[in-house]
Image (cartoon, helix red, strand yellow):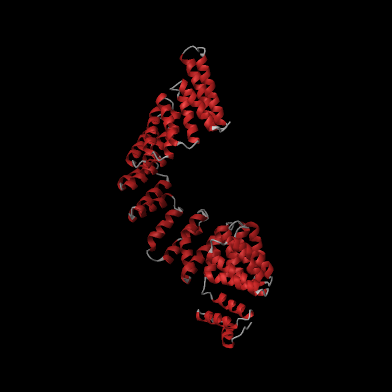
């Protein structure tokens, strides 16, 4: 039986036990028997999902027993299923009014209030639940949660204080209170919360990190540095503290900062994610600038990463990225392959491998690798695109067109990729000497980028093949105006004819 429908049966059992405890069990009257039967019928219809029939049954119960809290509660649940929240709330409130000692009714109504953003009302109910069961920690957290949603953070802090009197100072309540104090601009109180946590657990490094982060957030670098130094006294190998101190000392010298990370990268106990997180912004900068000094410094660190974590796909991936952006695609390719040997489910690495093969014009490997990638990522338009490039390079235009057709279907929301697919589709048709189809594809490409030199030149070739020599010459000239400098293009313009 689903837990969702367990409560009504349990409720009946509880009511029965209460009756037995309160006195001798009396025989049920005919009217009471009818009410019970109707209530059971209502629950059966509810279990079957016959919501409207269930409403009728529970209303019948309430007509005969106007303050039947169990029927009103079940009616609330049915109205909720029918998405009539107002009626559900009204029925839920009636159940509480007629039986205020039942905590389930209040819990249900509080959750119902959340759905309609009545957070203040939900908070009031959890306040009542705490009074009913002051040792239920979950009630306190919910109470505070709804107070925060109701824009009453100070009251939420009081709830956490009340909870701490019962269970003592702990990380969860401290974090909540600190966050609330920060939001209220009460920075001293926010810091005091963490300090009290450290006083209680002086050897817990994590709490000192919490304090150091607080100082960083509030701009107190001096105290943050002092806290990180205290952490290193407790744990000389703490990577986060070492990184933070290196960051403090770097100033504007990124190279100095990266070199200061070397001890962290040499430590096999420091997890690889912590290390990579620190250098990713610099790898991105290398991709944008191609800065050789930055590239060489990153190369030293990522090579160290591979040495310390040889069985991690991430170490080979990030080293591959640094090598690639440092102008060493062949060595990058080796690292990407090692990465895929360890974890072949990373599309971004496949993408880089395919790009390198395409750039090297290694069409045999491009076809082979793109088909391996497609076995894993059949819905990646880029994989189909590279597959087509490979077949075009191997002079198998029909196979290329099959790949480009798939890529076109998948690239409707990716204009740059769609442009490239259309350009290559035109190339396939040109190889097949299907010049009208080539013209159509290249025209569609030019709608996306009217100044692409390669497309303009190839469109000129197509026009020449179609006997439109004047149009061809104009397109070749336009390609030169936009920066085309190939010897073939210059000859086409000078001689006024197709040269291949």
Outermost residue toward the bottom in this view: 495
Q: Position of residue 202 (x, y in %)?
A: 39, 44
* Front position in the image: 161 or 239: 161
Q: Nearer the viewer, residue 341 or 242?
A: 341
Residue 201 visible at all: yes
The quarter of the displayed image where residue 427 is located:
bottom right
User: How far from the left and from the top, in percent, is residue 409?
Assistant: 60, 61
- Look at the picture and state if 324 lies above or below 20: below
Count of number-bearing discs: 0
| Residue 397 locus on image (x, y percent) | 67, 70
Residue 467: percent from left, percent from top: 63, 81
The quarter in which the C terminus is drawn is bottom right
Q: Is residue 475 above or below residue 114?
A: below
Q: Is residue 455 left or right of residue 126?
A: right
Q: Nearer the viewer, residue 332 or 365?
A: 365
Q: Residue at x 38, y 44 (%)?
A: 198
Q: Pick whichever, 128 or 439, lies toward us.
A: 439
Quadrant in the picture for the N terminus = top right
Q: Is residue 303 visible?
A: no
Task: Tell me if residue 280 comes above or below residue 125 in the rendering.
Answer: below
Q: Residue at x 38, y 30 (%)?
A: 128
Q: Is residue 100 left or right of residue 432?
A: left
């Amino acid at each position: 039986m689903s837990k969702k429908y367990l409560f009504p049966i349990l409720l009946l059992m509880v009511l029965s036990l209460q009756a037995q405890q309160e006195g001798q069990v009396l025989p049920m009257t005919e009217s009471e028997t009818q009410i019970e039967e109707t209530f059971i019928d209502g629950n059966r219809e509810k279990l079957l999902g016959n919501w409207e029939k269930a409403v009728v049954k529970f209303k019948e119960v309430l007509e005969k027993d106007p303050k039947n809290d169990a029927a009103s509660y079940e009616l609330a649940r049915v109205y909720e299923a029918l998405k009539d929240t107002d009626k559900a709330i009204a029925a839920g409130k009636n159940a509480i009014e007629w039986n205020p000692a039942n905590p389930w009714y209040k819990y249900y109504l509080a959750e119902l209030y959340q759905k309609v953003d009545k957070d203040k009302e939900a908070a009031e109910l959890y306040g009542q639940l705490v009074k009913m069961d002051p040792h239920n920690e979950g009630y306190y957290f919910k109470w505070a949660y709804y107070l925060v949603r109701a824009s009453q953070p100070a009251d939420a802090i009081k709830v956490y204080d009340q909870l701490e009197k019962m269970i003592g100072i702990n990380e969860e309540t401290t974090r909540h209170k600190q966050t609330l104090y920060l939001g209220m601009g009460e920075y001293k109180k926010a810091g005091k919360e963490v300090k009290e946590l450290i006083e209680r657990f002086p050897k817990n490094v994590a709490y000192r990190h919490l304090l150091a982060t607080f100082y960083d957030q509030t701009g107190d670098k001096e105290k943050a540095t002092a806290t990180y130094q205290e952490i290193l006294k407790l744990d000389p190998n703490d990577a986060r503290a070492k990184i933070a101190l290196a960051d403090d000392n770097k100033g504007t010298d990124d190279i100095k900062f990266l070199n200061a990370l070397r001890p962290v990268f040499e430590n096999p106990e420091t997890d690889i994610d912590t290390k990579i997180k620190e250098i990713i912004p610099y790898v991105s900068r290398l991709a944008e600038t191609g800065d050789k000094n930055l590239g060489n410094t990153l190369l030293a660190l990522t090579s160290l990463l591979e040495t310390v974590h040889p069985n991690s796909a991430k170490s080979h991936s990030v080293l591959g990225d640094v090598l690639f952006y440092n102008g060493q695609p062949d060595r990058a390719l080796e690292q990407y392959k090692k990465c895929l040997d360890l974890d072949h489910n990373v599309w971004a690495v496949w993408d880089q491998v395919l790009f390198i093969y395409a750039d090297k014009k290694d069409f045999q490997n491009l076809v082979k690798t793109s088909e391996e990638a497609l076995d894993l990522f059949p819905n990646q338009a880029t994989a189909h695109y590279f597959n087509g490039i490979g077949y075009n390079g191997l002079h198998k235009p029909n196979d290329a067109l099959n790949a480009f057709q798939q890529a076109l279907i998948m690239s409707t929301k990716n204009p740059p990729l769609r442009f490239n697919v259309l350009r290559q589709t035109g190339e396939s048709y040109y190889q097949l000497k299907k010049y009208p189809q080539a013209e159509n594809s290249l025209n569609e490409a030019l709608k996306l980028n009217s100044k692409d030199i390669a497309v303009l030149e190839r469109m000129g070739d197509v026009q020449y093949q179609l006997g439109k020599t004047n149009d061809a010459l104009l397109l070749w000239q336009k390609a030169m105006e936009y920066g085309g400098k190939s010897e073939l293009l210059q000859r086409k313009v000078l001689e006024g004819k197709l040269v291949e």
